[in-house]
Image: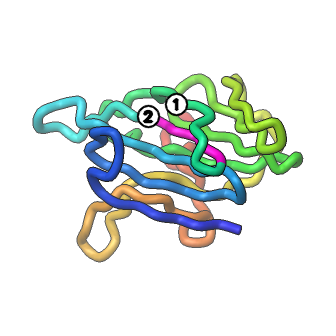
Amino acid sequence: MFMISCGHNSSANYTLVSEYQFDNIKIKIGLIHNHPYLAEYRKFIEISSQETLIAKEELFPDSGGYAWVAIYKDDKNNIIVQDFGNYGLLIDVHELIVKKIENTRRTSRQYIGCFDFDRTNGKKRYRFISSIEDPTEPLSRVKGG
């Protein structure tokens, strides 16, 4: 079961925020403007279960064009979070713990979707975009990725 919600200025002084619900795990991505006029952001992830915060981490900074955060599911139904940085996060949905992992691209995984800017209908909105809406994985859009 998937549930999605998003909005602006709705959490912890984030400039933009979007949430994604995966069964009992809620993933919130918050962006804070990092530059007065360029589209550069600091990215944060908050992971919770039943309103209890499990982890909060700062992710790889967006220096322009890398605001996306991809979500995958592994063969044990755990969640893998990957952005443009060198490591990802594994959310163990059974133990409710979060671990930093390297080489997430070598992990057997199913692409669920990503948080990114949606530029449809002439608007620019940060939200979760499911793989049903856009099956293209973000790393496949990056040259050399």
Q: Residue furthest left?
A: 37
Q: Main secondary structure of the magenta part?
A: strand
Q: Position of residue 120 (x, y in %)?
A: 34, 71
Q: Quadrant of residue 124?
A: bottom left
Please report whichever mark, 2 or 1, sits nearer to the chain's N-terminal start: 2
Q: Position of residue 29 (x, y in %)?
A: 45, 44
Q: In this view, does 117 lie above or below 30?
A: below
> In which quadrant of the rendered image does the C terminus lie?
top right
What is the number of callouts on the image?
2
Q: Which amino acid does label 1 sit on?
A: Lys
Q: Where is residue 139 in the image (x, y as percent from the top left)?
A: 56, 43
**Real-space Cα separation, disc 2 to disc 1, in angstroms:** 7 Å
Q: Which marked residue is nearer to the observer: mark 2 or mark 1?
A: 1
Q: Give the range drawn in magenta.
A: 44-49
* Residue at image point 42% right, 59% down: 127
Q: Is mark 2 on a helix, strand or loop?
A: strand
Q: Which amino acid does label 2 sit on?
A: Phe
**Residue 56 tag number:** 1
**Residue 44 tag number:** 2
